[in-house]
Amino acid sequence: MSNKTYFFLILILGSLTALGPFSIDMYLPGFPAIARDLHTTAAKVSLSLSGFFIGISVGQLLYGPLLDRFGRKKPLFIGLCVYIIASLGCSFTKSIDGLIMWRVVQAIGSCAATVASVAMVRDLFPVKDNAKVFSLLLLVVGVSPMIAPTVGGYVTTAFGWNAVFFILTGMGVAILAATVLWLPDSYKPDKSLSLKPRPILLNFLLVIKEPQFYTYSLTGAIAFAGLFAYVSGSPLVFMEVFHTDEKVYGWIFAFLSVGFIGTSQLNGPLLRRFKSEQVVNVALIAQAAIGMTFLGAALAGLLDLPTTLVFLFFFLCCVGLVFPNAAALSLAPFTKNAGSASALMGALQMGMGTLISIAISLFEVPSVVPMVTAMAGSAVLALLVLVAGRRFIAEQVDVNHEADTGVLH
């Protein structure tokens, strides 16, 4: 394809992938304001974030078979329409229970964009380019933690937290228009695929039984859960433990995202010298070491704001290397079932994120320790899963050099 086509495809797919992160990050500075307006606590408001993660986990399993059965675009259009309606519902809600409900629906809509964009990477690009494309998508996605909380902080201060959801509604409309006008059909609908529960479950089982998939998707999901622990715990840590305001919190969030995005873009040059599995190995070892040191400092009471920022920065640098390579290695064995595989991979990521965010919301005492414990634990567990799972991979599909003819399904 031409460079212009390549650029627009990355931009549209990146926008689809970024819709979920924008929906997560942009309202974080508004937690105290939402708690005041809806007469609840910041910990209860964080359940709306957990509800979003639950919606994405469930929704991705729903959209996977739909994307394989009806092609990529029709389910994507429906999901974006659901997202737009739910975003308006969040804007007008008058209770915390209503906000949680609408956030679940909003997530179900947004995950159509997430699953479709990941599946279309596998459709539109050769296997050997997948890790590089995922890194480019992370560059677009990376704009969200750099811009969303900062914009959200200023919007909340000037217009109230409801305005944040009006902006998300507008984003949904713009992305829907872009997909209708410029996104190509990348996959011929598989009409032989049944949507009855039993065949769907058997199809998912076929994907799960692939050792390369379950090893790297589970490794990536657990490692990525450290990022969710940071996202869920950071409003409490920065605004209540270190007493920053909404605007400063937004800038801190933007600064920390530089590490995540910077290393994800370093992944491209690294892959010219090393294999994806080598990058994952080193990044996970570093992530676990940083996480455990971070935890030790937290338990010893040695953390102040600058020290916490340093630890978080380097921890997120490691996540930026693990995610694109683990995702590419997970999807490499699949062509026919790429939609279901990407849905399962996303559901695992969001499922882990949901568990961690709910666990952190249970600790209402202002402290850095719950967030850091979750981050360190996720890194160590991911490393153990990788070491154990690789023993069952008989012949790994090499995402850096393998041609499309080498895929399994």
Image (cartoon, helix red, strand yellow):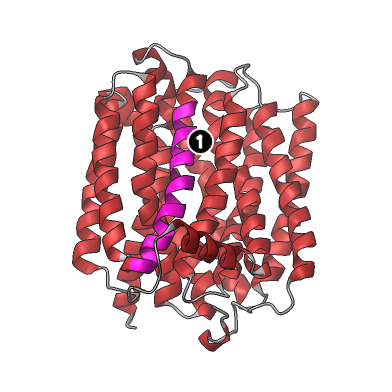
Q: Main secondary structure of the magenta part?
A: helix
Choose between 145 and 332: the one closer to the eye: 332
- Is residue 262 placed above or below 82 in the rendered structure? below
Is-magenta flag for residue 59? Answer: yes
Q: Which residue is mark 1?
A: 252
Q: Residue at x 61, y 63 (%)?
A: 208
Q: Residue at x 42, y 53 (%)?
A: 62
> Circle 1 sits in a helix, a strand or a loop, which is it?
helix
Report the span colored magenta: 47-69
Quarter where residue 189 is shown:
bottom left
Q: Position of residue 406 (x, y in %)?
A: 58, 86
- Is residue 224 placed above or below 121 in the rendered structure? above
Is-magenta flag for residue 204? Answer: no
Q: Is any atom of residue 52 visible in this view?
A: yes
Quarter where residue 409 is shown:
bottom right
Q: Position of residue 24 (x, y in %)?
A: 43, 39
Q: Position of residue 219 (x, y in %)?
A: 67, 56
Mark 1 surroundings: few (<14), some (14-19) or many (≥20) residues within 10 A: some
